[in-house]
Amino acid sequence: MAIVVLETRLTASDIKKAREEYSSYIKITADLKQQLVAIGGEYHADAEQLFIKTHGSKQRDIWGGGYNITSHTFETNAMINLQPRRNKSLEIIDPAIRKNFLTLVKRKLRRIKSLL
C-alpha cells in the first residue's frame, strides 16, 4: 500500500507507486486547508490518517476523490467524504469545496497524463 504525498513535482515513479493497489485508478486525498495532496493507497482513510498524524491535518479539511486512468478524468467521490453534518454523500456536494478540491488536485497532478 503505497501512499505518496506530493511535496514536489509529480514524477512517473510517484504514479507507479500510486497504482500499486489499482492499475486503472489512482485514489486522491487532499487537505484543502494545508494544500496537501496524497495519491495511492487502498483506502482514502489511510492517507487521511497519515495527514492527521504527520501534518496535523483536521478531518473536516480532508476530502477524497480519484483519477480514472482510462478516461483521464478526475472524480470527487470517496467514503471519507461522508460527514454527517456537512456532506451526506460519497460525492463532494458543496460546489465550493468540490471546486477547491478539483483546483488543488488538478494543479498538483497537471502532468499526470503525460507521465502515464
Image (cartoon, rainbow, N blue to C red):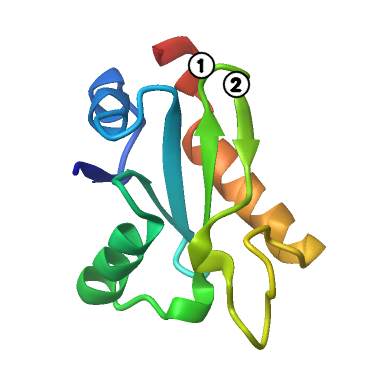
Q: Residues within 10 Å of mark 2 (few under 14, many from 20)?
A: few
Task: Tell me which residue sits at (66%, 88%) in the image.
Answer: 85
Q: Quadrant of the C terminus?
A: top left
Local SS, label 1:
helix
Q: Is residue 22 left or right of residue 28?
A: left
Give me the residue at 40% from left, 14% from top.
115
Residue sitting at the far right:
95
Q: x%, y% of residue 51?
A: 31, 67
Where in the figure is residue 17, as x and y percent of width and height?
A: 23, 30
Q: Amino acid at mark 2?
A: His
The residue beneath circle 1 is 113
Few, some or many C-alpha atoms within 10 Å of disc 1 (few <14, some 14-19, many ≥20)? few
At horizontal 68% and vertical 67% (from top left) the residue drawn is 89
Q: Which numbered circle lies on residue 72?
A: 2
* Image: 59 above or below 7: below
Mark 1: which amino acid?
A: Lys
Whole-percent x, y for residue 63 in the image: 53, 62
